[in-house]
Structure formats: structure tokens, C-alpha cells
Amino acid sequence: MGGWQLYGLSDGRGLNKVDAKAIPLQAYLGPLGMPGVTAWWGLNKIIAPKAGETVLVTAATGAVGSVVGQLAKLAGARAVGVAGGAEKCIYATETLGYDACVDHKSARFAEELKAAAGPRIDGVFENVGGEPFLQALRRLNDFARIAVCGLIASYEGPTTPLPDMRIFLVRRIKIEGFIASDHPDAWPQALAELAGHVAAGRLRWRETVRQGLESAPQALVDLLHGGNFGKMLVKLV
């Protein structure tokens, strides 16, 4: 929260001491940081998947989505991802353990999502918005839960419109937007559980690293256009 800079002055408030002996230091900016806690909260507190349910995760290989998919599997749910490109979809299924992953760039996206998701979707962890979200709404089960974490498709383009609102009534759907920083009391539990998964090898992640503070603006632009694979990081020195 100190800004894009090489140095910062702090009285210690808002800082946490971390142990980099067993876990790489940068993991505390990814699965053991804000992205990991965001994944943990949205999945456990909003979607709350039951064993055997189907959870759809958009931006499935990003810093947040990659953790969501793995936590969903640990909860006994069936995890279906949406990602951009064949390489990311292969990583989602072969490394992260997703049961299926659909490329949103495919000309047959709607058809492929229907086949991958199965009869109905019980939970949606939404990071993108746009067409993937609209297609997911058509596949929802009764009493489905939607955690709205991000709408990256709408940041530079048109906003995502809602369909006929009857779907929310007829399907009795719960939809909730959230920001992890609103729930500071949950962070210790979330981080403890995530650290346990990392230490046991149950949680995997990937990073895209750019060199030098001067690369930060372009790194952000590339992030918004899907140019990252996993967590986007800038190495300062």
C-alpha cells in the first residue's frame, strides 16, 4: 500500500513480518498475500462449495483464480476454469488440478463451456465479467452463489450488462461483490490455512516477473490485457 517506489518510511502499522526460509518471499504477494486471502474469502464465505458441486472460476490461472480452483478441489468440489489461450488451459488442468478449462478466445466458447460445466453450475468466482459471465449465468443451478471479485473485461471496454433479472429470482441466486481488505479479522485464519497448504505442497502458483520499477506501468497494462501468467510482479532491484 506504500505506492510504486523503491523506498518507504513506516512506523510499522499495517506491516507484517514474514518468514522467507521455507517459502519464497514473493509468495507473500501472491498465494500467501492479498490474492490468496481474496480467493479464500470469496470461495469459503460466499460460494461455500459442498462436495460434488461445480464451481466455475474465470481468469482461472491468475493470481487469485489459481488459488480458488485449488481450494475448490480441496473442498471436494468440481472445478471448471475459464482462461485465455490453450497454454493457460493446459496449465489449469495439468498443474492446478482443474477438472476442465475453457478458452474464452475460442469461437465455440459458449458450446465448450456448456460441455465442460456439465448440467449446472453451483458457484461462480467472477474475475472477468463480459461474455464469460453472461454465458455462466445461463448455466446456473438453483441456489447458485456468485462471488464478484473483479470485472477485468469492463475496465477498458463496455460494462457488463445484466440479463433478464428473472433468472436471479427463478434460480434463487445469491450474488455478492467483495474486497478482501474489508475483512481484516479473517486474514489470520486465511493465511494460516493457505500457509499450511503451501507447506504441504497442496497449493501451487506461477509468476510473471518484470525487472525494474520503470517497467511497472507497462506491466499493469499487460496485466489488464492478459499478458501475465499467474501473479504479475515487478522486481525492484
Image (cartoon, rainbow, N blue to C red):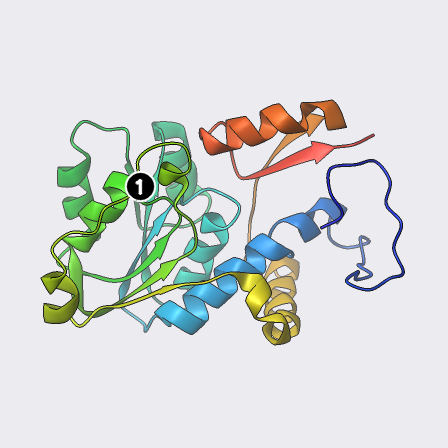
Q: Quadrant of residue 184?
A: bottom right
Residue 67: x and y, percent? 50, 54
Kindly tell me whether residue 116 is visible in this rendering: no
In this rendering, position of residue 118 left or right of residue 92: left
Q: Quadrant of residue 4?
A: top right
Residue 99: x and y, percent? 31, 51
Residue 38: x and y, percent? 52, 59
- Is residue 236 or residue 119 the one in the foreground? 236
In this rendering, position of residue 5 left or right of residue 171: right
Residue 158: x and y, percent? 30, 35
- Is residue 147 or residue 2 the one in the foreground? 2
Q: Residue at x 50, y 50 (%)?
A: 64
Q: Is residue 146 above or below residue 95?
A: below
Q: Is residue 25 above or below residue 197?
A: above
In this rendering, position of residue 177 left or right of residue 164: right
- Can you identify the residue that label 1 sits on? 159
Q: Residue at x 36, y 32 (%)?
A: 84
Q: Residue at x 86, y 45 (%)?
A: 8
Q: Residue at x 35, y 29 (%)?
A: 85
Mark 1 burial class by Cα count in 10 Å: few <14, some 14-19, many 20+: few
In this rendering, position of residue 206 left or right of residue 10: left
Q: Is residue 70 above or below residue 101?
A: below
Kindly tell me whether residue 20 is visible in this rendering: yes
Q: Quadrant of residue 10?
A: bottom right
Amino acid on which disc 1 is placed = Thr
